[in-house]
Amino acid sequence: MIIDTPAIVLKSFSYGETSLIAHCFSKKNGKVNIIVKGAKSKKSPKYPYFQPLSYIDLIYNLKPNRDLQILSKVNFREYWPNIIEDLYRISLAITILEITNKTLSENDPHPLLFKVLIKVLRLLNNKVSNPKVLFWFYECELLKQLGFQPNLDQHDLPGLVLPDIQNNPSSSIIIATLLSGNINKLPNEDITKKNSKIISDYLWKLMCYHFENLENIKSLSVVKQLLK
C-alpha cells in the first residue's frame, strides 16, 4: 500500500555506509521507521530531508510485516529558520522530538497530537509565545492524547508524590490553562522562577511516571535549565 502523508522527522542515524534510518511522526500512520537507501552518497539529494525537525511530505510503500519502510518520494513541506538559529528554541524543539519518539508506538496514529506538534513548532518559529509555555503545553497535550489526562485535584499517584500545586494558585491556574487545550490562549504574562520550577517539576514527574526512559533524553539537562 502506498502511503502519502505529512511527517516530522524525529530522529535519524546512519545505516551501513550510505543509508539512513529515520524515525518519523506521520499524520496518517503515527510513528514510522523509514530506510533511505543511498542517502549519504554524494549524488543523493535526500540527506537534508531526513534531519530532525524536517517537516516533509513522505511517500512510502507500507508493508505491515516489515520493521523498516522503504522511501519512495519526499519533499519539504515547511521550514523553521527561527528555531534552527536560536539555541533556546532549538533545544526545546529537539527535546519535544525526543519525547515524542520515546512515547509513541509504531504505526499507532495520533492525528490530533500531530496537529498540536505542528502548531507548537510554528509558534516557536514565529516567536509569538513564550517558548517554555509552548513546551509545557505540548507535555500536557501528549499526556492527554496518550490517555494520561492530569487531574489537578490528585496530589499523588501510587509510588509518586506530586508537587502541591494547590498551595500555589498561580501555578495551578497556569496548568489549568494549559490543560484547556487552547493554544491560542496561552499565558502571556511573566512567570516567576518559583512558578516555573513548580510547573516544570509537576509535568515532568507525570511524564516520567507514565512513560519509560525519558530521563535518558540527551538534551534534557540543557532544557531543565532553560525551563527554570
Image (cartoon, rainbow, N blue to C red):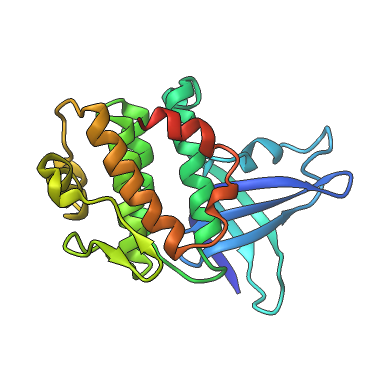
Residue 15, horizontal then vertical, whole percent? 81, 50
Where is 130 relative to 152, above or below?
Answer: above
Where is 86 relative to 121, above or below?
Answer: above
Foreground: 80 or 77? 80
- The residue under the point 38% across, 62% down is 160
Foreground: 209 or 12? 209
Residue 12, horizontal then vertical, whole percent? 67, 46
- The residue under the point 59% across, 58% down is 59
Residue 201, horizontal then vertical, whole percent? 35, 45
The quarter of the image holding the C terminus is top left
Residue 21, horizontal then vertical, whole percent? 72, 52
Q: Tell me, yes or no, if residue 79 can be seen here.
A: no
The quarter of the image holding the N terminus is bottom right
- The residue under the point 64% across, 78% down is 64
Where is 161 relative to 64, above or below?
Answer: above
Foreground: 193 or 25? 193
